[in-house]
Image (cartoon, helix red, strand yellow):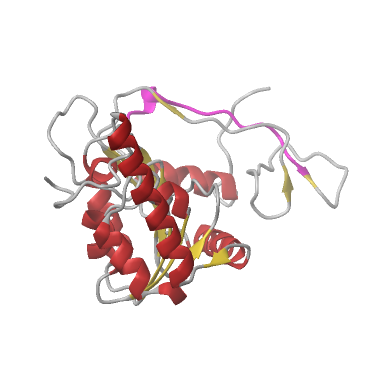
Amino acid sequence: MGTRKAPSQDPAAQVLLELLGDVPWQRSHVRFACHRKERLESSSHDPNQYGVLGLGYWQPCCIIMVMVNSKPPHEVETSLYKLVFHPISDEEPSSVFADAAQDVSRDATELCIVGPYLGGAVLLPLVEGRKFRLITDLEACFGAGVDEAVLSLLSDHLDSIKNKAGVHAKLVCSSKAALFGSANFTRQGFASRDELGCLIRDPQLLLIVQQWFEDLWLTSDAVDEKALSSVAKQVKERAVARQELGIATENPPDALAHGTWDG
């Protein structure tokens, strides 16, 4: 297998240019390899034709790899994608996830949200003044205590809430952008934990993410006041029992953290 410059009309070349065009890099820091592709409707091999996985009618014969041998900043961005993570060496609270979530929600009339752990300090500002649909795991959400702000929000918007036992994804999505990754919608998740996420604006990927949410919504359970109150009651009873037994309350992923995400 050799390396060569892909033709300018090739979609693989366009993808690489899109990925690297807005990111600071040096030629010596980037290595990539292309291998000949087969067209699905032909058995002939054309050494001048290159493709990329998932684009057009090209059958992939190998993987295109891009390796950047330099330490990235806490945000790496192109016109369609942004990697988001807290500076690992920085002990101060970071706003990169909150900023990315605000990018998603800016000018949005409706949000689609998925998350098992919810904190009022993050969730309430995100949904304030707009329609939203939220999929959560109620047992996980209130697993170690009841955030009264979140409980009140859910109670006021029962038609917009669904329960999915075991759901672990973290997503906020609008019609123009989506943020997903490891960060819970909580103060520590958005401000200080070692999390990694991706903000996307690619229309084709957005359609896939939006359809994934719709499919998950259809397979999730409706929530009524009785179910919500039952979960909250069970959590409070467990907390009282733990206190009477002298057992420390479990520390959830900052689900009960209040205040603002930026400290």
> Is 232 displayed left or right of 149 in the figure?
right
Relative to 78, say whether 123 is above or below: below
Relative to 51, say whether 30 is above or below: above
Task: Tell me the residue at 68%/31% (across/down).
Answer: 62
> Bounds of the magenta span?
26-38
Task: Tell me the residue at 25%/63% (across/down).
Answer: 124
Identify the image quadrant of residue 74.
top left
Residue 140 appears at what percent x and percent y?
44, 47
Residue 213 colored in magenta in the image: no
Residue closer to the observer: 202 or 61: 202
Residue 44 seen from this side: yes
Residue 111 appears at what percent x and percent y?
39, 68
Say which quadrant the C terminus sits in. Answer: top left
Count of labels in the image: 0
Relative to 81, say whether 128 is above or below: below
Relative to 247, say whether 142 is above or below: below
Task: Tell me the residue at 25%/33% (across/down).
Answer: 73
Residue 251 seen from this side: no
> Is 168 displayed left or right of 249 in the figure?
right
Residue 97 appears at what percent x and percent y?
27, 48
Residue closer to the observer: 208 or 98: 98
